[in-house]
Amino acid sequence: MPIYVLWVSLQGISLNRLHMKKFLKIFMPMLAFALISACTDTGITPVPDGNEDQEQTDQTGQDEQTQQPEQLGPGPDFVSQFQKHVALWEFTGAWCANCPAGYTNLNFTLTAYSKYTDCVHMMAFHSDIEGKDELAIDATDQIMIDMNVAPMGFPSYVVDMDLGGSLVESVMLKDHLDQTMTDNPCYCGVAVSSELADGQANVAVKLMSEVNASWRIGVYVVEDKVKYYQKDGMREYPEYTHRHVVRQIASASYKGDRIGGQVTPAGTELLADYKIAVDTAWNLDNTYIYVLALDSEGHVNNVNHCAIDGGNSDYNKL
C-alpha cells in the first residue's frame, strides 16, 4: 500500500492515549512493510547506463545463432568437384577355410561392373582369433565388433565403415556399394604423397573441405600380393597370394585422427604429416599408403592412396 494512503487515513482518525499504543503496535509493522515494498517495486524503471542496446543486440544474435545453426555438410543441391572413392574392408584369416571363396565372391562383384574398377579400394584385415595368422593386426577383432559384422564371422566386409555383410554369398555387396556411392556423396578431396628416408616413410596428407564439416583422417599401410600360408576348403597352400593386406594403422586408431577444428570452413585445405617406421618384412615395391577421410559420423567420405616409396597422388577431380 502506498505510504501517502496510510498517512491520509491517519489524519481522519481521532484516537485517545489508551488506544494510541495499541494502534502504533499495529500501524508500525504496516508502515515498515509499505516502505520496503516502495523500495522494491518492480515497476520502477532503472536509469539507462548506455549498454542496453548492445546487450539487446548480443542477446538477439545469440538467439538467432541458436535457432539457425551453421550449416554442416552438403546442401541438397551440392555437387562435388571430386570423384567419390570407396573403402571396401575385407575381414579374413589364413586359417579360415571359407575365406578364399569369400574373396572370389568379392572380386567377382568388383570386376563384373566397370564403375567399380578405379574407385573401390580394397583393404584386407587379417585376424588370428581362431588360428595362426602372421598377417593379423591387433585391431581387427575390435573393428569387426564396432562395425557389427563380428556375428557374421569370416569372411565378411564393410563398405565405407558403414554398411557390412557376409562374403560367404555376398548377395548384398553390390547393393551396399551402390548405396554408399549414391547416399554418401563425397564433399572433400584427399591427396597423399610418401617419401622413404632413413628407414621411415614421410607421408604428407592434404584434405580439401568443400563444405563446413568436421574431419578425421585414417592412415594405413597396405601391402599387396603377400605370400603366406592359407587354408582353402580341405586344402592348404603354403605360398598363397594375399591381396591388399593391412599391415599397420598409422593413425592413432582405425577411427582416425582429428584434422582441423571442430568445424572446418568450406574451401579450407587441411594438412597433416606422418612418419612411419618401415618394417623390413614389407615388400616396398607392393606397399602403399591409404588415406581415408572420415566425416562427423565416422563414415568414409573419400579415399586416396599412393606408393610408399616415392608415391604422389593428387586430388581426384572430376
Image: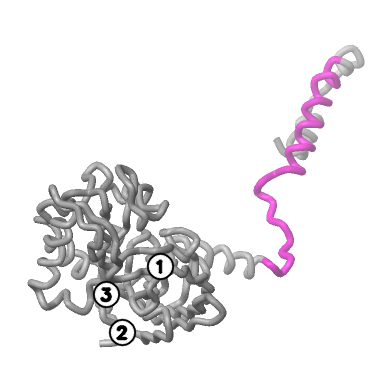
Percent coordinates x, y for residue 36 in the rendering: 77, 37
Which residue in the structure is indicated by mark 2?
Answer: 316
Distance from label 2 to label 3 (Cα)? 9 Å
- Height in image: 127 above or below 280? above
Marks 2 and 3 close (CB-CB < 8 Å): yes
- Range shown magenta: 22-51
Q: Considering depth in this image, is 268 or 244 the residue closer to the camera?
A: 244
Q: Label 1's element?
A: strand
Of all residues shown, which one is farthest toward the right?
A: 17
- According to the picture, the residue beneath numbered tag 1 turns out to be 220
Which quadrant is the N terminus positioned in?
A: top right
| Residue beneath disc 3 | 85
Examine the structure image and report whether residue 75 is included in the region drawn in magenta. Answer: no
**Magenta run includes residue 31:** yes
- In the picture, measured across the screen, residue 20 lies left or right of residue 178, that is right
- The spot of residue 235 in percent (x, y) is 15, 51
Q: Residue at the spot x=48%, y=80% of the render?
A: 204
Q: Pinpoint residue 247: horizontal percent, then vertical percent.
A: 39, 64
> Residues under labels 2 and 1: Cα distance?
19 Å
Against 277, residue 23 (above or below) is above
Query: Where residue 71 sits in the image (x, y, percent)?
Result: 39, 69
Q: Residues within 10 Å of mark 2 (few under 14, many from 20)?
A: some
Within-10-Å neighbours for mark 3: few <14, some 14–19, many 20+? many
| Kind of element beneath mark 2 | loop
**Crowding near the residue tagged with mark 1, few <14, some 14–19, many ≥20 C-alpha atoms within 10 Å:** many
For marks 2 and 3, the one nearer the N-term is 3
Q: Nearer the viewer, residue 151 or 160?
A: 151
Q: Secondary structure at mark 3?
A: loop
Q: Amino acid at mark 3?
A: His
Q: Earlier in the sequence, mark 1 or mark 3?
A: 3
> Which quadrant would residue 10 be assigned to in this image?
top right
